[in-house]
Image (cartoon, rainbow, N blue to C red):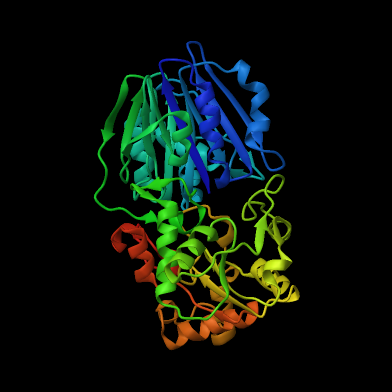
Amino acid sequence: MGGLFGVVSTSDCVSDLYYGTDYHSHLGTRRGGMAVCNDTDIQRAIHNIENSYFRTKFEAELNRFHGHFGIGVISDTDPQPLIVGSHMGTFGIVTVGKINNQEALVQRAFKRRSYFSDTTAGEVHPTEVVAMLVCEADSFVDGIKNAQEVIEGSCSMLLLTDQGIFAARDRLGRTPLTIGCRDGAFAVSSETCAFPNLGYEVDHCLGPGEVIRMSPDGWEQQTPPGERMQVCAFLWVYYGYPASEYEGINVEDVRNRCGAALANNDGTVVDFVGGIPDSGIGHGIGYANQRRLPYRRPFVKYTPTWPRSFMPQNQKMRDLVARMKLIPVRQLIDGQRILFCEDSIVRGTQLRENIQVLFEYGAKEVHMRPACPCLIHPCEFLNFSTSRSTLDLAGRTAIKALEGAEDRHLDEYARHGSERNLAMIDRIREKLHLTTLQYQRMDDLVAAIGLPKDQLCTHCWDGTSYT
C-alpha cells in the first residue's frame, strides 16, 4: 500500500515531517523517504525499513535537514522521494497507487526518445513514470492533470516545489488525502491519525482528482474535484488505522458497526467473543457489545520486533511473521466456545494455523465472522500485496475446487445467500477446520461505512468498479 505526508510551515518543518511520515508505518515496511526544500536546494534521504523501523533509520539524520517545506513517504514499491530537474524547476515527488498501463506509458516515452534513470531488475519505477508525465506539461498543475488523465489504475501524489506543496488525490479518489492546519503550518496526509499529536486539526478532505497547493499562508484549490468517487472500502475494513478518518468517517467507529451488523444476523451460542489482532479487534468489540457477550483476548499480539505480516514480499516470511506475532493464552481457550471477528480472509493459510492452535489448546468450538464479504477478485487499483493473483484468494480456491475452474459463475458466488455462495463458504470453512463461518453482507458493510455504494470501490468482493 503506502502513505504520504507533507508539511509547509513558517518555522522549520523537519520534526513534523519526521513524525507525520512515521504515523504511516502501518501501511508498509519496505522503504521510507523524506525530502525537505530550503533556500538553496532539496535535501533527501531514503532508507530500507524492512528490518528496522522508520524512526530508527532517520533519527540520526535529522540534524542535517532544515527547511519550511517537506514531503515524506512510506513506500512498498519504489524508492521515494524522487528529485527531478525539469523545465519547471527542480521538484520532489512521492506517489501512492498502482499504474496498470505502465508498460504502455514507458513504451510511449521510448518512442519519444525519453529515458528513465531509476530501474530495478529492468523495471522502470512507477514514480518516475508519474514524474515523466508531469514534465510533459508547462506547469505543475497541468502536469498533474496530464498524469491523472492517462494513468489507468490510481495515483495520488505530492510535489515539493519552491512554490509550496502540490497535493493531488487520484482521479476516482481510491486513496484519501486530507489537509490539516494549525497556527503557522499546514499538512497533508494519507492518514489523519498523523494530525492530533502534532497539533493539527482536519481542515479539508480532498475530493477525487482534486489538486491543491499549500504554502505557509494557507492552501488554495488548483483543480476542483470530480463528480464520481470510488474510495476503497477496504480502508475501513482492514488497512486504515483505527484513529484515522476518511471522508469524515472514523475507522474504528465503522469497525464497531461492522461487528454489530454481524451480531444482528447471528444467534450462535458461544462463551465469549474475540478479535484477531489488530484490525479484527474493533469488529469484535462491536459484535460483543451488540450481543452483550464478554469480549476476551485468547490471542495477544507481540509487536515490538515483528512488522505487519502482509508486507514482507516472500509468502513464507509473511506466514512466519503472522504466526510469531500472535501468542495464544491457554487459560482463556481451554474448554471454551469462541467466536472470532476478523477483518477478512484473504488466503486463509495463517488463519488455519491459528485455528489449529486453538483446538490444540482445548477449544470446544471456533466460529469465525469476517467483517466483509468473501474476497473473490484481486485488487486492480492499489498495491495491496496479499491479493496479487486470483488463486491467492481463499474464495477463488474454493470456486476452483467446486467448478473445476476458478472463474466460473463469479456473480453467483458473490451473491450473499445463493446456493453457490453458501457452497463456497462451506468449502472455506472445511479447509480452515472452523465450527461455523459466516461472512458480512455487502449491504451491511455499505451501511456501516455510511456512504452510498456507488461511491465505494467494492471490486474485490463483487467485481464492480468504475474506471
Residue 273 appears left or right of 303: left
Q: How many marks?
A: 0
Q: Going 51% across and 50% down the picture, which residue do you hit? A: 103
Q: Is residue 23 placed above or below 37 in the rendered structure? A: below
Q: Going 59% across and 80% down the picture, which residue do you hit? A: 429
Q: Going 59% across and 71% down the picture, which residue do you hit? A: 391
Q: Is residue 60 placed above or below 170 in the rendered structure? A: above
Please name whichever residue, 403 or 125, is drawn nearer the observer in this view of the structure.
Answer: 403
User: Quick one: which residue is furthest to the bottom in this view?
Assistant: 419
The picture places residue 271, in percent across and down from the top left corner, at 58, 75
Q: Is residue 177 placed above or below 373 in the rendered structure? A: above
User: Quick one: which residue is furthest to the top in this view?
Assistant: 40
Q: Quadrant of the C terminus?
A: bottom left
Report whether residue 371 is seen: no
- State which quadrant residue 440 falls in: bottom left
The picture places residue 380, in percent across and down from the top left corner, at 47, 59
Please name whichever residue, 223 or 146, is drawn nearer the observer in this view of the structure.
Answer: 223
The picture places residue 139, in percent across and down from the top left corner, at 34, 27
Report whether residue 167 is seen: yes
The picture places residue 219, in percent across and down from the top left corner, at 31, 27
Please name whichever residue, 205 or 227, is drawn nearer the observer in this view of the structure.
Answer: 205
- State which quadrant residue 118 falls in: top right
Q: Is residue 278 placed above or below 183 in the rendered structure? A: below
Residue 189 appears left or right of 313: left
Q: Going 54% across and 86% down the picture, which residue do you hit? A: 403
Residue 348 appears left or right of 127: right
